[in-house]
Image: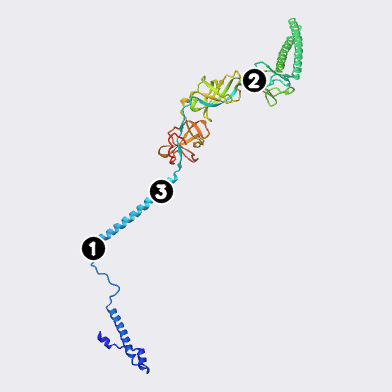
Amino acid sequence: MSAENESKPTPADPHRSEQGSGPQQSEKEQPHALSAQAQRDQEIEAIQQHSRHQTPGIQKPPELPPAPPRKALTIVGVLLLVLLLAGGFTLWSHMSHERALAKETEIDTVPTVAVVYPVSEKPDEDLVLPGSLQAYEESPIYARTSGYLVRWYKDIGSRVTKGELLAKIDTPEVDQELNQTRAARLQIVAQMDLAKISADRWENLRKTDSVSAQEADQQTSGYKQSQANLAAADANVRRLEQLEGFKDVYAPFSGVLTKRNVDPGALINAGAGAAGRELFDLARVDPLRVYTSVPQAYAPYIKVGAKTNITLQEFPGQKFAGTVARTAEAIDPATRTLLTEVDVPNKDGHLLPGSFGEVHFAVGSGVNKVTVPVNAMLFRAQGAQVAVIGPGGKVQLRAINIGRDYGTTLEVLGGVSPTDQIIINPADSLEDGQQVNVAQRPQGQQKGSGS
């Protein structure tokens, strides 16, 4: 290294050359310039030495001996096993997620419904049903002969007895026809007398052979024809006499006149056809008939002859005794009820036909009744139904028998029990056997507590 330093020429300092060559360079400045040059040369030499002894920045990794073949296979197997486990876990995770998503989707497709329990009712001592009071007999009265009304003798509200005169009709045409028929009868009687005399005479002449048998038979036949004509004339007279009898209008039975539609001078046409005019309306009000419709569930308890009570709003606190007179002996398929007639005595006339009342039957204790909300009803072609939650959360559609309507609730006489879960506000698309989810019931709502 010293040889290289010695052999290496020292670079010339331009300042120094200029100063040495310059005539104005002083002797004092030359030693200072030489020392600065020497210092720079030393720095350059130190840098070069440092660069020669500096190690490279990137070092080679240490060389390792190759692994044995069995160990290499073990490592590869472990790596493959790890990859398989990772892939299997990923696949299982995806499948679990898909199953959870499918289950959630299935749950979302199943409708959720709200349910209530029917409320049990206390057994009633009486079955109370609406009834309509009607006259036991009611008949419109028409004229049987034509003419003009002379006068009427009874007005509406009049109580009449059977055979009592109600009105009188003037029939001039019928009177003249009757007179003409009677006169024609007298003519026929005279002709018959002459025919009899002639027949007798020709019969005597026939005995002496004065006349032929043919002539005698003709006279006898003429007499018999006269007898027949007289019989026809008598029948026609009786017919007109009966029409004359219809000039007076009588009551066919005892009762009360509820209508009067004519006044004196009105033209009266015979019969009840299009031209006929109703004169009076007569009703028998003692006893009265009360018709009511008994629900099918109570029909077996209705017996002919059973005692009942009838109440009316206009007579608070009063009960009118009645008797079951007859039933229709058949259930009406439209209403599922039994038409029942109750007869009620009405001697004092307090009860008026056409009134509305309530019939009390003593059969209520034999029927179990519950009430359900009115919004639980389904109205379909099969009739009134409710949707009940069956085993496994599946819908069961049940037909019910409706008793009384309380407005917001209905009395059900059969089809459900207090332990059944009934769907409220059921959808029209709800079907029998459909799977549903039951909504969480509010706390404190127990069986039989209703909605």
Vertical relation: 156 (above or below) 396: above
Residue 254 percent location from the top left of the image:
63, 17
The residue type indicated by label 1 comes to Pro
Can you tell which mark lies on residue 256? 2
Q: Which mark is residue 441?
A: none
User: Is there CB contact under 8 Å for labels 1 and 3?
Assistant: no
Q: Nearer the viewer, mark 1 or mark 2?
A: 2
**Residue neighbourhood size for the residue with mark 2, other residues' Cα within 10 Å, grouped as few (<14), some (14–19), many (≥20):** many
Q: Which residue is mark 3?
A: 102
Marks 1/2: CA distance?
Answer: 129 Å
Left or right of 287, for residue 435: left
Classify 260 as above or below 407.
above
> In the structure shown, which secondary structural element does the residue marked by tag 2 occupy?
strand
The three-letter amino acid code for the residue at tag 3 is Ala
Give the amino acid type for the residue marked by disc 2 in the picture.
Answer: Val
Q: Which one is in front in this view, the residue at disc 2 or the one at disc 3? A: 2
- Taking depth in this image into account, of 408 and 140 the one nearest to the observer is 408
Image disc number at residue 69: 1
Of all residues, the one furthest to the top in this rendering is 208
Mark 1 nearby-residue class (10 Å; few <14, some 14–19, many ≥20) = few
Rounded to the nearest whole Å, what is the CA distance between mark 2 and mark 3? 80 Å
